[in-house]
Image: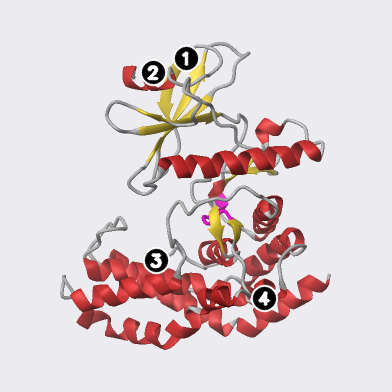
Amino acid sequence: MLDFINVVSQFRIEGAVESVSPIGNGLINETLHVTTVGTDTPDYILQRINDTVFTDVDLLQHNIETVTAHIRHKLEAQGEQDIDRKCLRFIETSAGKTYYKDGNGRYWRMSVFIPDTCTKEEVNPENAFCCGETFGNFEQMLVDLKEPLGETIPDFHNMELRLRQLQEAVKADRMGRVASVRDILGELECSADEMCLAERLYRKGTLPKRICHCDTKVNNMLFDADGKVLCVIDLDTVMPSFVFSDYGDFLRTGANRVAEDSDDYQSVGLKEDIFRSFTEGYLGSAGSFLTPVETGHLPYAVALFPYMQCVRFLTDYINGDIYYKIKYPEHNLVRSRNQLLLYRDVRRHDRMMAEFVEKTLKL
């Protein structure tokens, strides 16, 4: 507790600290609720930044500061009220930074706590529409951002890189597991060239990179008591990327009939109602700035992300489970097979998805 109090004291907060307690179940960053004395001062969120994942903390916070300042400016221009509930506000230290490095080399940041809010874990057609609309609006507000942002995780969604990493793992075969996954490797190889399309389009200059969230899950937004979305949270991965990252990765998790690590393989598949609802919401807010190349390849994005995640899970399995946390020895293998089955089912929906995107854009 004394250690936390000392960390909090480095930030320019209002009021006196009453207590510091854990909050949430994040897997990357340690998060705590800082309660202040009385009702006239806000509470805060204290978070330890995982600098193993985010190695350039200065860049990380620069991205977040730039994005939140731009969104605040947009909300003010729109005449929005109670902006502190609709955009995260980070607190500076006495040195004027939004992060603090303690004597043990740990990095911390603080933001204002937004009361009377909740996150959701389940995706249904109703909130899928809100999620699509919210993430599309998030991109739309940042489309005119002039300040350059860096990649907090370089090549995070670079399919060509992920395939090279898989090839390196197969060549090394350090755990002797390659022979048991030849079937998966063969199927991945058949689609490898097609799934690297985004990088080729980018090099040709026909596919732009935009400022994207890059971790579009339903639990990365705050809802108020009436179920209305207030704001997008967890901004660590906000960086330049293809819009496919935000669109495709949400549907990878939100529109699968089962969890990504379920071994109920017969149940794996695309929920069409979630796809339609999210797409309607997303195009309703993002359709105003997306190019024909981007909208025309949204069905590709839905296939890309289960394919990419299969590659990543399989790479980790072959390497000996050194990246993803596992609960049992075959966990990453189960995840790989699950995502490959989802990829197959998504491809069976190619025509339906393309027709729905085209129809929605005309509304």
Q: Main secondary structure of the magenta part?
A: loop
Magenta residues (range): 212-218
Q: Are marks 1 and 2 in contact (CB under 8 Å)?
A: yes
Q: Which element carries disc 2, helix, strand or loop?
A: helix
Marks 3 and 4, Cα distance to the nearest angstrom? 34 Å
Is 154 drawn above or below residue 224 in the view shown?
below
State the mark number for residue 293: 4
Horizontal arrangement in the rendering, residue 339 relative to residue 346 (left or right): left
How far across and how far down the image is residue 191, in percent?
A: 45, 85
Mark 2 vs mark 4, foreground winner is: 4
Q: Amino acid at mark 4?
A: Val
Query: Which residue in the structure is indicated by mark 1?
Result: 17
Please tell me which of labels 1 and 2 falls first in the chain. Answer: 2
Q: Which residue is mark 3?
A: 262
Decide if residue 349 is on the left or right side of residue 169: right
Q: Who comes first in sequence, dot 3 or dot 4? A: 3
Tell me the amino acid under the disc marked 1: Val
- Residue for badge 2: 5
What is the quadrant of residue 206 in the picture? bottom right
Task: For marks 1 and 3, give the CA distance.
Answer: 43 Å
What is the spatial separation of the Cα atoms under label 1 and label 2, in whole angstroms?
8 Å
Name the residue at 60% across, 16% down.
41
